[in-house]
Amino acid sequence: MKQITVAFPSGRGERLLIPESSNVGDLRTLAQETFGQGFVKLVTANGVILTDAIESLQAAGLEDGDHVTALAVEPILAASGGAFALCIRGGDRVVTWGRPAEGGDSSAVQGKLRGVQQIAATNQAFAAMLED
C-alpha cells in the first residue's frame, strides 16, 4: 500500500492508503469519495496536473509519502434540443449523449476537444470553446 496525502489549498487534507498497483483514476476516485467532492483535479508537488486516469501512480511519479493538491472543479453542462454535453473546464474530454442528430455523438471530434473552457448549445449542436 502507498500512503499519499491529498489536501485542498484550504488545508483540509487526508492521508489516503491506496494499493501499489493503482492508477491516477483510482487515486482521484478515492479523493472524491473521501472528501465528498464530485469532481477534483489532482496536482503533484512539482506542479504536474494528473490528467491521465489510466496512468499508474508509479509512472505519474507518485511515491509512498508524497503530497498531492486537490482542486475542486465545476462541471460544465449544456443541452441542445435532444442531447447533453458534459465536461470539466480545462479538461481533455467531453461526454455527450442523446440524439446523434442533435449533438449526442461527439466521437468524430473527440480528439480535438482539449482544454475545453466552455460549451455552448443550439437546438441541434454543441460548440466547444478551447483554451489558446
Image (tube, rainbow, N blue to C red):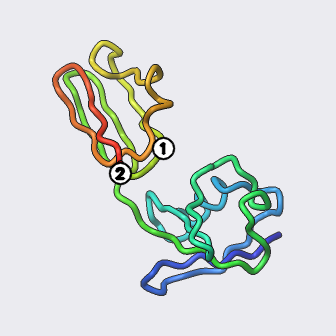
Q: Amino acid at mark 2?
A: Pro
Q: From the top left corner, tell me how far across and down residue 109 is, in percent.
A: 43, 25
How many labels, in total?
2
**Secondary structure state at the residue bearing disc 2:** strand
Name the N-terminal-most of marks 2 and 1: 2
Which residue sits at x=46%, y=19%?
108
Element at label 1: loop
Between circles 2 and 1, the one closer to the viewer is 1
Q: Position of residue 94 (x, y in %)?
A: 42, 37
* Label 1, residues with CA under 10 Å away: few <14, some 14-19, many ≥20: some
Q: Residue furthest bottom?
A: 11
Distance between mark 2 and mark 1 Cα atoms:
13 Å
Residue at which label 2 appears: 75
- Residue 65 is situated, as x and y percent measured from the top left of the image, at 75, 80
Q: Which residue is mark 1?
A: 92
At a point 72% along the width and 54% down the height, the residue shown is 23
Residue found at x 55% / y 82%: 13
Disc 1 residue type (three-letter): Asp
Q: Position of residue 93 (x, y in %)?
A: 47, 40
Q: Residue at x 62, y 76 (%)?
A: 45
User: What quarter of the picture does the N terminus occupy?
Assistant: bottom right
Q: Residue furthest top?
A: 101
62 vs 26, nearest the viewer: 62
